[in-house]
């Protein structure tokens, strides 16, 4: 299986390709990285959970479990508040959780791993030859100092004593530097950080299967050549520098693969797909057949889909760096042999994973439980962040729009003033037909008939959803009854005043005409027309016309009651008799002496004003005849 490695030192991202497909990412990003060694200070000890919180110099406290503290006795016997402690990060901070730390320091090298707080020598289980295991163990036992522990890695198989000694001396030098820095600096402080990305990728991923390494800078190429030469790796590895115009991660397809790894849906070659969702407690993987229908039977289709899903699940676990509890929901299989075959495929697929996944049994519901050691931040935690609007939930709450008592009272008062229905309730509380409407469950047809009648009655009603501006314009255009009543009263008063003025002017004309008859025309300095000439012009036939002339009214008069009509007729006869007496007296006075002005106070009633008008007209007519 040919492998190739792409290292973008500018972006601190590297990717391992197997058969032109990415199988693993190496990312160096963040303030606290996996493997960092800190001089911390104990802040709080919690015996209830057998853990302590230590300050490592960040905004989140480090979590130190009692099992990760070296020594005998209880947690309070091992630790004390404000105590200085050398710890190493074994789990990077995720979300709202801080980093997890341990007092068991381990410094990895190319062929060995130094364990300063432990003693003894361990050999990798992947070295199968017992003779090689004994040889490596004897070499390390002679080289290591007393009181230190060493783990011999798989890469040490076949290496010489000098190469193993050189690697071990480098690790001892690093440990001495950590001890010296811990005595000189104050807590909290960073004491040691693993080598850069290039060193880590060459140390962890460069094996005999690697055929090509692509870097983005000439300096990275020079360092890669030195590391391969010092570690006696495969000399046939092709090392090159990328010189294209696009970024290395874009040209090699790493960016596209990262974007696909951040999606929930993963397509399978046969047409099926996986659905991966990570939660706070665990990660769920659902297997679906999708469009895969090329098999002869249903059982064969299910088995092939599940086998494809097993390979892709093992790859996605490494790509996404998923840790903790993982639940896999395979397609239900009826055959027990198929279930066993799927479990064997899964165990073989995750065998090369350095996070050491543990696969459980297949349950009756078709679920497989497995755990994977959480090493660093997952791919989603590095390249994504929570939405500021939904806070990572994917949903935004709508405004409930609950009505308050104040707003409802204001709407009701406005509607009551303008005689309009409530805003927002078009056909509610509109008239007496719509109050206390209850649905009749026993007779639904009656409800429909009432609804139709109600719609016809309110067909021309105004829209209740009109805003305040429209309501104000309606109020200006439509005066209420009180305003109309006041206007009519003013019009009636004006008419009465006009009648009074006309009567007074008529009396003044009569008196002036009588005075002119008595005085000779020579003595007058102003030419005034003679009243006799005016009298000759006026004929008796025109007198009834004057009596019938009445002011025009603006509205139609309604008939009075019968009793009132009789009283009005009697009053009219009395006024006629009085008018005849007055006219007789006027004739006598014209012959004897100058007449005197007689004015009567007008009555306040409308009938009296009419009678007074008729009396005046009758006197004018009699004067003309005389």
Image: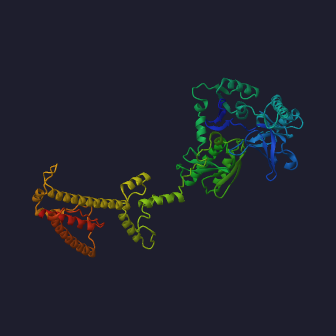
Residue 403 in sight in this render: no
- Asked which quadrant contains residue 600, the reply is bottom left
- Asked which quadrant contains residue 186, the reply is top right
Is residue 388 or residue 393 the one in the foreground? Answer: 388
Rendering colour mode: rainbow
Is residue 40 or residue 429 the one in the foreground? Answer: 429
Residue 497 in sight in this render: yes
Is residue 254 or residue 126 the one in the foreground? Answer: 254
**Relative horizontal placement of residue 60, taking residue 304 as reference (left or right):** right
- Asked which quadrant contains residue 616, the reply is bottom left
Pinpoint residue 293: horizontal percent, then vertical percent.
Answer: 52, 50
Measured along the vertical axis of the image, is residue 73 above or below residue 148? Answer: below
**Relative horizontal placement of residue 32, taking residue 271 as reference (left or right):** right
Q: Residue at x 11, y 64 (%)?
A: 625
Pinpoint residue 74: horizontal percent, then vertical percent.
Answer: 86, 50
Q: Residue at x 67, y 29 (%)?
A: 9
Image quadrant where one finds the N terminus: top right
Image quadrant where one finds the C terminus: bottom left
Q: Residue at x 43, y 55 (%)?
A: 465
Q: Residue at x 30, y 59 (%)?
A: 494
Measured along the vertical axis of the image, is residue 381 above or below residue 496? Answer: above
Pinpoint residue 287: horizontal percent, then vertical percent.
Answer: 60, 50
User: Residue most toward the right?
Assistant: 146
Is residue 533 or residue 450 the one in the foreground? Answer: 533
Pinpoint residue 289: horizontal percent, then vertical percent.
Answer: 56, 50
Q: How many marks?
A: 0
């Amino acid at each position: 299986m040919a492998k190739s490695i792409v290292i973008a030192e500018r972006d601190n991202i590297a990717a391992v390709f197997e058969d032109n497909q990415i199988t693993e990412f190496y990312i160096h990003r963040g303030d606290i990285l996996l493997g960092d060694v800190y001089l911390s200070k104990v802040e709080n000890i919690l015996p209830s959970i057998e853990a302590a919180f230590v300050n490592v110099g960040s905004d989140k406290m480090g979590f130190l479990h009692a099992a990760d503290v070296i020594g005998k006795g209880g947690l309070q016997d091992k630790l004390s508040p404000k105590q200085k402690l050398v710890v190493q990060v074994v789990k990077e901070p995720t979300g709202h959780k801080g980093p997890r730390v341990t007092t068991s320091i381990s410094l990895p090298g190319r062929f060995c791993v130094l364990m300063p707080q432990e003693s003894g020598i361990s050999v990798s289980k992947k070295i199968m030859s017992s003779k090689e295991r004994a040889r490596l163990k004897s070499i390390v036992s002679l080289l290591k100092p007393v009181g230190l522990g060493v783990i011999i890695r798989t890469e040490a198989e076949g290496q010489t004593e000098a190469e193993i000694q050189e690697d071990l001396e480098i690790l001892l030098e690093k440990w001495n530097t950590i001890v010296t820095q811990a005595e000189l600096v104050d807590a909290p402080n960073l004491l040691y950080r693993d080598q850069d990305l290039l060193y880590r990728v060459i140390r962890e991923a460069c094996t005999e299967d690697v055929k090509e390494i692509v870097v983005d800078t000439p300096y990275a190429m020079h360092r890669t050549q030195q590391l391969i030469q010092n570690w006696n790796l495969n000399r046939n590895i092709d090392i090159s520098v990328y010189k294209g115009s696009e970024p290395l991660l874009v040209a090699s397809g790493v960016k596209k693969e990262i974007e696909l790894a951040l999606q929930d849906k993963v397509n399978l070659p046969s047409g099926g797909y996986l659905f991966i969702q990570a939660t706070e407690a665990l990660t769920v993987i659902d297997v679906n057949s999708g469009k895969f229908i090329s098999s002869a039977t249903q059982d064969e289709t299910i088995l092939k889909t599940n086998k494809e899903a097993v390979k892709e699940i093992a790859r996605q676990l490494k790509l996404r760096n998923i840790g903790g509890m993982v639940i896999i929901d395979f397609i239900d299989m009826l055959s027990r042999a198929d279930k066993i075959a799927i479990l064997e495929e899964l165990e073989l697929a995750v065998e090369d994973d350095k996070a050491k996944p543990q696969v459980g049994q297949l349950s009756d519901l078709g679920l497989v439980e497995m755990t994977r050691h959480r090493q660093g931040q997952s791919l989603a935690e590095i390249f994504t962040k929570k939405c500021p609007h939904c806070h990572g939930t994917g949903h935004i709450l709508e405004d409930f729009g609950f009505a308050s008592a104040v707003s409802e009272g204001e709407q009701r008062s406005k509607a009551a003033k303008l005689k309009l229905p409530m805003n927002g309730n078009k056909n509610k509380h509109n008239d007496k037909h719509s109050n206390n409407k209850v649905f009749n469950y026993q007779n639904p047809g009656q409800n429909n008939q009432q609804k139709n009648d109600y719609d016809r009655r309110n067909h021309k009603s105004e829209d209740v959803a009109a805003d305040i501006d429209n309501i104000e314009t309606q109020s200006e255009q439509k005066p209420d009854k009180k305003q109309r009543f006041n206007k009519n009263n003013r019009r009636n008063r004006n008419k009465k005043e006009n009648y009074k003025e006309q009567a007074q002017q008529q009396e003044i004309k009569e008196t002036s005409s009588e005075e002119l008859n008595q005085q000779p025309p020579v003595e007058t300095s102003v030419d005034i027309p003679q009243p006799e000439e005016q009298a000759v012009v006026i004929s008796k036939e025109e007198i009834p016309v004057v009596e019938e002339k009445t002011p025009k009214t603006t509205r139609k008069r309604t008939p009075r009651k019968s009793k009132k009509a009789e009283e009005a007729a009697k009053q009219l006869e009395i006024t006629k008799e009085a008018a005849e007496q007055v006219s007789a007296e006027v004739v006598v006075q014209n012959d004897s002496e100058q007449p005197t002005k007689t004015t009567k106070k007008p009555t306040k009633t409308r009938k009296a004003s009419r009678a007074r008008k008729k009396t005046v007209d009758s006197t004018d007519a009699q004067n003309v005849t005389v």
